[in-house]
Image (tube, grey):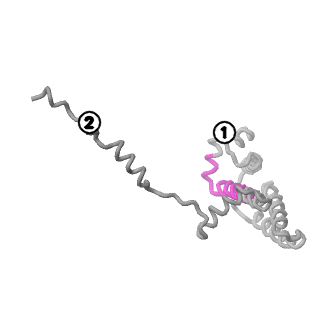
Amino acid sequence: MFVNVFLPRYTKTLDIISTMCYVSLSLIQPLLMKVQSAYMDSQSTNPTNNSLTQSQRDFLVILEQKLGIITHAADAAKIHRTTVYDWLKQPAFAAAVKQLDEAKKDFGESLFLQQMKEGNTACILHFVKTKCKERGYGESREHGFDKRASELLAQLFAPDAETDCGEDTEGTQ
């Protein structure tokens, strides 16, 4: 069922958050129960979810297993890709796929943050360069040439005084 696709991920995400923040999961558990309850209520009353066909719900489960890659999921579901792209024109299905994509981003972000916590230098540098630009950590790119480069280019493209690159004037009248 569609609800079962998302709930375990949120539990795992809260597990990761509690580990990263050194907070006991028992402190977060009441919040998790409220989130799950609200989510299940919204799914049972949400006309968007009810408007999906069983084939679409089955495909969404497979799409999650295939990490959001439509071609692989369509092959596994034994349906043509164009069918999926036709389904994506339906707002309810498109919203469900977007929700899967957002969950995938959340999962990737949690893994990234876990790597930062473990001291992965590349992840730390990436984070600082992209999220701390206002603190002076962004990469700077200089546009233009230094004086020596400009001189070399001028020599390279300047007309040579010894040879005439123009038209031959000796034989013409």
Residue 151 in sight here = yes
Residue 90 lies in the magenta stretch: yes
Q: Indicate the position of residue 121 as horizontal and vertical percent values.
A: 72, 57
The numbered mark at residue 162 is 2
For the C terminus, give its image quadrant.
top left
Task: Assign the magenta stretch its main secondary structure.
Answer: helix
For the N terminus, give its image quadrant.
bottom right
Q: Indicate the position of residue 40 as horizontal and vertical percent values.
A: 80, 65
Return the residue nearer the eye: 48 or 129: 129
Q: Amino acid at mark 2?
A: Glu
Query: Who's the residue at 62% across and 46% down the image?
Result: 85
The numbered mark at residue 80 is 1
Q: Amino acid at mark 1?
A: His
Q: Is residue 80 above or below residue 20?
A: above
Q: In which quadrant of the rendered view does residue 115 lie?
A: bottom right
Query: Who's the residue at 77% across and 47% down the image?
Result: 65
Query: Would residue 112 be found to the left or right of residue 11 on screen?
Result: left
Q: Crowdedness of circle 2 by 10 Å Cα count: few (<14), some, many (20+)?
A: few
Mark closer to the chain start, 1 or 2: 1
Return the residue nearer the eye: 44 or 66: 66
Query: Who's the residue at 80% across and 69% down the image?
Result: 35
Label 1 sits on a secondary structure element that is loop
Label 2 sits on a secondary structure element that is loop
In the image, the segment drawn in magenta is 85-107
What distance separates the C-alpha of mark 1 from that of mark 2? 69 Å
Q: Indicate the position of residue 10 as horizontal and vertical percent values.
A: 80, 62
The numbered mark at residue 56 is none
